[in-house]
Amino acid sequence: MSEPLLEVRNLTKYFPVVKNRLFFSNRTAEVRAVDDISFTIHKGETFGLVGESGCGKTTTSRLILFLEKITGGTLLFEGKDISKMNPAEFDRYRASVQAVFQDPYSSLSPRMKVGNIIAEPIIVNNSAPRKEVSEKISALLALVGLRKDAHELYPHEFSGGQRQRIAIARALAPNPQLIVLDEPVSALDVSIRAQIMNLLHDIQKKMHTTFLLIAHDLAVVKHMSNRIGVMYLGKLVEIGESEELYSNPVHPYTQALLSAALPSHPDIPRKMIILPGEVPSPLNPPAGCRFHPRCFKAEGICSRQTPSLKEVSSGHLVACHFA
Amino acid sequence: MISNDNVLEVQDLKTHFYTSRGVVKAVDGVSFALKRGEALGLVGESGCGKSITCFSLIRLVPRPAGRIVGGKVLLEGEDLLTKNEKEMTKIRGKRITMILQDPMMSLNPVFTIGEQITETIRVHQKLGKMEIWEKVKEMLRLVRIPSPEVRMREYPHQMSGGMRQRISGAIALSCQPSVLIADEATTALDVTIQAQFLSLFKEIQEQANLSMIVVTHDFGIVARACDRVAVMYAGKIVENAETRELFNNPAHPYTIALLNSLPKMEMKVDTLYSIEGQPPELHALPPGCSFAPRCSHVMEICQREYPPQKEVAPGHFARCWLKG
Amino acid sequence: MEHILTALPWARRLTQVRQILRHVPVVSVLILLVFIVFGIFGNYFMPHEATKAHFGDVLTPPMWQEGGSAEYILGTDHLGRDILSRIIGGATISLEVGFIVIFFAGALGVVVALLSGYLGGRIDAVLMRITDMFLSMPFLMIAIVLAAVLGASTKNIIIVLVTLGWAGYARVLRGEVLRIKERDFVLLARVARCSKTRIMLRHIFPNIVNTLVVLGTLQLGQVIIAESSLSFLGLGVPPPAPAWGSMVGDGRDLIFSAWWVSFFPGMAILFVVMSTNLLGDWLRIRLDPKFRQL
């Protein structure tokens, strides 16, 4: 296994529930969006984070992107604690982490030309001399498979798939080491998804970029990721190599999630575990293991004690009392 | 030919939109049949005409741009396209009904759940107050809403997405329709909630011998919930077969390519098969087969003439010159 | 033929222009064009000097009435000044006041909206309370007080109208900023480490321009009415300058004997304001994606 690029240690994010007054506001409660999670992303790999809406996977990615303030815990980038970085190192960190979001219709400034959209991160971060910017744009357009003259057009002149290519080109522009892919294909048409997934795969091969993939489609995550973390209600419940995790899920939630995934063929037999009820509110998460009210294995201990991640086999960690 | 076990028969349905950019042939000669108790999947990408097909069935095509210009929609032998609006109002919601993707759009935020189901029942059935009340409770129990007496006094915003979608289902089912259309009904739901919803509806459908049209872009939903599939591309049904047959022996290059382009959990491949290009713009369709520009088996005839429908195996139809 | 034409870039542009023309409120645009041309080049169109009194021809009726003459097409006022010339001259004043007020009020409103909407928090709370304060001021009373304190002059009327006009922009545009701020491209600009200023100017501002244009057009009418009202009350543009409002005011006591003195300037106000409102509405529907047709 290659060396770690980003280590996430005890990362926590509580959103205050705020009541607005005329000039001031006061906190009334907290939403525990991400609660004490740790994982490591290695250089050149794709790390997938799966879970259902509200599980905290997107919040995790926003903390890594510094779009939200971290409540607790820390990030180590190439072994260095980012809270102890000097401003120059911190700037370098920010430039080496870029993102591609789900909706290609919302992620490109509608009134900027494609060339300027792609050039912006280069110019803002001074990651290439000004003279070379236009060359770099042409190279990026070619890399993502768009026509040469695309840089002088506006985003609305492109289809969804092409826009996602533009978004990828922009993310690649400042030569990042890590790209956060937040649902990169789920807004696209079925026949376009494969194009974009293949493109991302080729880019990773060519540029050795590391990906953090956030997605809810289990087949997409499985296809793209080397290792996968499963989240439930702000907690990481299982981490493992993707083959291992899919063939041998240990946590009851992972088992249920995989059994709920839609089959790719009607003949594929699958033991269905239909979970009762709905995901509880992160405002007031259940005590102990957060999954215990819906779990088919739950016993007394589960409501009293929060399980921590334990290694069940090499590189396969599970947070369950029965693992 | 009207056989008795076909609840719904659609023949050569054409719905066109008249826009400033030209005529958009959103639905262009669609034919299919739905047997009693069968779940038919209508699969395709966005803009292929699958939703417009469904809106045409219940005669709710957006006006004035859209118009049904031809064909027949036979519901239990009666042609819905010849009905006037008053007659349609009686049929819609009672004999043929629809669940949409976003339950927040179809539920009225200012009425309670109970009031909304009551309304549907009251419009279509002559029942006393107590009977309706009992019926509402029964419907909520049917879609597994816990403690219906409490829940029926609540408003849509007090429920989760999965529960709202089941409420939409309860409203749709409250008049025992012959045909239920589910338009991307589970797309917005989470994986486990989607599984809940699908298994619940499969059960209800089998119990009530309900016929369903499941509109989706996801072959996984077809594989799990449908008996038969119709694949749509650019306003036409290009392939129609029983689910198992379609997955085992797909005939149309578009179907084959789509199935191959899906990532699968069961096996690992490095590169997915990908269909190049974009779905065509419906107001500027190429002559001949609309898939020809993206097809890897394209022949000279494909660019001239649209292929007729052929039966490639018993009950398995495709529109492709390769199968000539 | 059609598709060959549309392949040429200039022909495509031409068809686009034609398409737009088909739906533009033509009459409104014509009236406003005349208004703007008179406003800028009024001096060349005036049959007489706007402020010159002809004491021999006091209160001449319009030319088609008995006693009227072709010399004074729309008649003269109580000092014998030519009404048509004064209306043309008044266009200059209304245009000047209108555009300057819109420019400054709009600019101030945009700045407040961007700071308040994008930065949020305490800045937002303070700026919005100030905006609320300005929005709740009784317009006419404040205008009278300010005009009385500052004295009646074109400059002061502009100051008064900007002071009372910017808050409307700030309120509406802040809403737009809040909406756009949540779009992914703004988040990605932050990921790319764009500065706050850059995000506000390059990413958010271009996306509120449409709304700004609509608001400006709609406000032009209001500003003209406000300026006319103040002039009517004698608190606006001081005499003898030919402001439409003061012209209506001049004819107030003559309304039964010489209706034309206040009628024609009143009509000028009506037509111009109505045209700006119609055009503003059309722009709103046209530029606002929420109202855009299929």
Image (cartoon, rainbow, N blue to C red):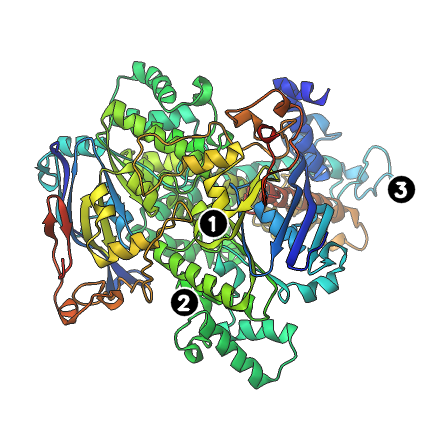
Separation of marks 2 and 3 at Cα, in angstroms: 79 Å
Give the mark toward the camera: 1 or 3. Answer: 1
Q: Quadrant of the C terminus of chain A?
A: bottom left
Q: What subunit carries mark 3? A: C
Nearest to N terminus: mark 2 or mark 1: 2
Three-letter amino acid code of the residue under disc 1? Val
Q: Is residue C252 left or right of residue B224?
A: right
Residue B299 image offset from top left, x and y in percent: 58, 21
Q: How far from the left and from the top, in percent, is residue A223?
A: 31, 38
Q: Residue at x 18, y 47 (%)?
A: A239
SS class, disc 2: loop
Q: Secondary structure at mark 1?
A: helix
Q: Are marks 2 and 1 in contact (CB under 8 Å)?
A: no
Question: Label 2: chain?
Answer: B
Asked if residue B78 is positioned above or below residue A300 in the image, the reply reads above
Q: How far is the residue under mark 2 from the one under mark 1?
A: 27 Å
Q: Is residue A44 left or right of residue A155?
A: left
Q: Which label was assigned to residue B159? A: 2
* Residue C223 appears in the picture as rendered: no
Q: Are marks 1 and 3 in contact (CB under 8 Å)?
A: no
Q: Which mark is residue B222?
A: 1
> Which residue does the numbered mark 3 point to in the structure image?
C67
Q: Are marks 1 and 3 on the same chain?
A: no
Q: Amino acid at mark 2?
A: Met
Q: Nearer the viewer, residue A180 or C75?
A: A180
Q: Is residue B64 left or right of residue A191?
A: right
Question: Disc 1 to disc 3, how far (Cα)?
Answer: 89 Å
